[in-house]
């Protein structure tokens, strides 16, 4: 194929939890990028692969949907891409419809809708191994004849499990090209079916199932046994809370050794730069700006990967949907929809994909309420700040008979504070500005399955790469700016204070200090909060740069946590933790709220509300802690 001709585009379409993401990873490996739509199951990913015939193919992983009728914004993305209604995008050259072989009833309704479009299509009958274990006799030949499209059994998580699909994609694209489909990239005609047509569609699905499946679908026995325990109203909730508690304990204990290795590597780099470069601006930029700034953020990569590991395993195992089901009653008590759990849990990684994942919520008022409290879930960008302050002020002791680390317990408390605050805010909002009837939770519970190591590793690779790219671009640029502001102008002759006090950064920090003094923040913290608006974790890097330039001698040989433990009071540290529980969201979060809700009012309201909440919480914490400690 000529380089001037764009590669054919194949769209992956299917129900949620049908294995689309696993199939996408099997096709593309790590050769993909995330588009500016909505998250795994709610985001559109783009990747490339080469077919057996050598054709480079672009593949799109679209959000999961049950119908082209699109009752939620994420389903609308899939519908518009498939129908050619998305601005700047043509109709796909072919569709690979991914169906869960263990649950074809829901899948076939969508398959019949796609068939009516007249697009070249393939049905990938995924999870055939699971269907066979359940005793299901699915006949691909009968399905193919009834649907009028090729049907290919696949097992996306096994080596060689997609080879027949790759061969069929080649054949389908060749036929489509020979029939001139490649030049017919116009919008597909489609209209929403009437209630009568929907009844006919249901009867057609039942007829096809009766012919194509030779054994009645029975719930997997292991799944049924597990659900009796994991979905129990009390025991299931206790197990979920235990899983979340262990996750936060793991963030500290599992990441400790690699963090120490990174810290030692950064210290060695600093020593080498100090010994190799003459004293001057360049050495200061590298050691005090880049290493002290960017390095103080990069050191927290292991903890962020541990957090993402837990989230990935919960998603891939099928437990995430159960968690949403378990918490539906709790969510309903504060006026939220059960589906809000998944966007809110995603917000523990980052509020941006969490807010985008709220597209799965059909009701607009429920969606707005979920979006407004998403920043109260403690995102991974706050982890470096939490970890730094906890390491500086919380002793590394075991409690509760040695079973629980005190630092992990404090971390869990901070996360719990964000969750409870979010639920309280939702309770108030749903009874005041966002009144509306609560809709019941309807969702499919997939069978349990062991997470495939390759998918987990690919997910961790993507998250780690994104974090390092952020550290190497946004955070690096901000650290260079902060270093410059903190280093110039030079102190006057005869100056006795550290040079940073006479710099532009020092002037900015001292100008902001009176505003933040009532909550116990000094000028260094005030200065760190400004670039922290671009990315929360930047605050740690800024503190690293500021204190590297403010201190000298032996104090620089200790970690930043050690420096802060001697520079701040305990009430100040607790006040900063309270501030970050309710921390005003970063600019990227405000931007995605503006785009998702198509409104300037809601991001402005979010900023004002959360800033006020953060200031009030920090003020109360500082005063109470000062009274209790006699400060």
Image (tube, rainbow, N blue to C red):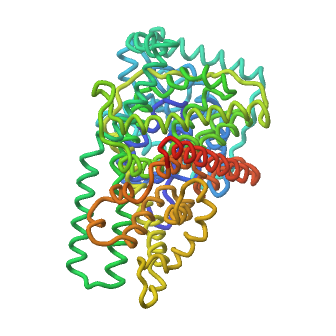
When asked about the image quadrant of residue 128, the answer is top left
* Residue 27 against residue 261 in the figure, above or below: above
* Residue 409 against residue 35 in the figure, above or below: above
The answer to whether one can see residue 118 in this image is no
* Residue 470 against residue 287 in the figure, above or below: above
When asked about the image quadrant of residue 354, the answer is top right
Side of 189 where 64 appears, left or right: left
Residue 56 drawn at (x, y percent): 42, 55
Which residue occupies the extreme front position in the image? Answer: 630
The answer to whether one can see residue 283 in this image is yes
Side of 517 where 30 appears, left or right: left
When asked about the image quadrant of residue 312, the answer is top left
In the depicted view, which residue is nearer to us: 314 or 123?
314
Residue 413 drawn at (x, y percent): 47, 35
Residue 1 drawn at (x, y percent): 44, 61
Residue at image point 29% right, 24% down: 401
Which residue occupies the extreme bottom position in the image? Answer: 493
């Amino acid at each position: 194929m000529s380089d001037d001709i764009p590669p054919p585009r194949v769209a992956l379409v299917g129900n949620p939890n049908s294995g689309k993401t696993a199939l996408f990873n099997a096709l593309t490996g790590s050769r993909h990028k995330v588009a500016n739509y909505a998250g795994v199951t709610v985001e559109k990913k783009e990747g490339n692969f080469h077919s057996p015939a050598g054709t480079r193919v672009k593949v799109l992983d679209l959000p999961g949907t049950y119908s082209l009728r699109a009752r939620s914004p994420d389903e609308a993305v899939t519908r518009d891409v498939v129908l050619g209604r998305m601005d700047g995008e043509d109709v796909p050259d072919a569709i690979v419809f991914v169906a869960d072989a263990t649950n074809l009833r829901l899948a076939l309704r969508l398959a019949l809708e796609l068939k009516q479009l007249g697009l070249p299509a393939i049905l990938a009958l995924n999870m055939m191994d699971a269907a066979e274990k359940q005793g299901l006799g699915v006949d691909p030949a009968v399905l193919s004849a009834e649907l009028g499209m090729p049907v290919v059994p696949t097992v996306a998580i096994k080596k060689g499990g997609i080879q027949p699909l790759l061969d069929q994609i080649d054949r389908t694209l060749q036929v489509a090209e020979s029939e001139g489909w490649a030049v017919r990239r116009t919008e597909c005609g489609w209209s929403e079916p009437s209630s009568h047509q929907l009844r006919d569609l249901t009867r057609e699905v039942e007829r096809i199932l009766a012919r194509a499946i030779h054994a009645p679908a029975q719930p997997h026995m292991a799944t049924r046994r597990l659900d009796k325990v994991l979905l129990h109203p009390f025991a299931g909730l206790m197990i979920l809370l235990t899983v979340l508690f262990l996750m936060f304990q793991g963030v500290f204990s599992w990441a400790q050794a690699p963090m120490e290795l990174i810290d030692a590597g950064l210290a060695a780099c600093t020593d080498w730069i100090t010994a190799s470069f003459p004293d001057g601006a360049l050495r200061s930029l590298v050691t005090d700006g880049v290493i002290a700034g960017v390095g103080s953020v990069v050191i927290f990569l292991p903890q962020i990967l541990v957090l993402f590991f837990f989230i990935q395993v919960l998603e891939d195992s099928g437990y995430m949907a159960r968690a949403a089901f378990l918490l539906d009653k709790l969510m309903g008590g504060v006026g939220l929809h059960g589906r809000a759990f998944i966007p809110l849990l995603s917000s523990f990684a980052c509020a941006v994909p969490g807010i985008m994942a709220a597209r799965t919520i059909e009701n607009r008022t429920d969606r707005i309420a979920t979006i407004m409290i998403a920043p109260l879930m403690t995102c991974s960008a706050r982890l470096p700040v939490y970890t730094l302050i906890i390491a500086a002020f919380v002793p590394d002791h075991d409690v509760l008979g040695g079973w629980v680390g005190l630092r992990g317990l404090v971390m869990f408390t901070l996360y719990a504070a964000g969750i409870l605050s979010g639920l309280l805010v939702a309770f108030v909002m749903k009874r005041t500005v966002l009144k509306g009837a609560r809709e019941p939770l309807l969702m499919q519970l997939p069978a349990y399955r062991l997470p495939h190591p390759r998918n987990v590793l690919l997910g961790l690779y993507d998250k780690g790469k994104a974090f390092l790219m952020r550290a190497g671009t946004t955070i690096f640029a901000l650290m260079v700016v902060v270093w410059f502001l903190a280093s110039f102008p030079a102190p006057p002759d005869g100056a006795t204070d550290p040079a940073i006090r006479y710099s532009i950064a020092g002037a900015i920090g001292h100008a902001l200090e009176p505003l933040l003094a009532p909550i116990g923040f000094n000028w260094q913290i005030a200065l760190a909060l400004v670039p922290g608006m671009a990315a929360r974790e930047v605050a740690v890097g800024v503190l690293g740069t500021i204190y590297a330039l403010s201190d000298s001698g032996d104090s620089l040989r200790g970690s930043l946590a050690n420096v802060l433990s001697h520079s701040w009071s305990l009430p100040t540290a607790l006040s900063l933790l309270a501030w970050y529980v309710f921390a005003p969201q970063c600019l990227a979060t405000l931007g995605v709220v503006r785009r998702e809700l198509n409104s300037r009012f809601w991001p402005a309201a979010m900023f004002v509300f959360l800033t006020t909440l953060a200031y009030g919480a920090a003020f109360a914490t500082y005063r109470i802690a000062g009274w209790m400690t006699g400060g």
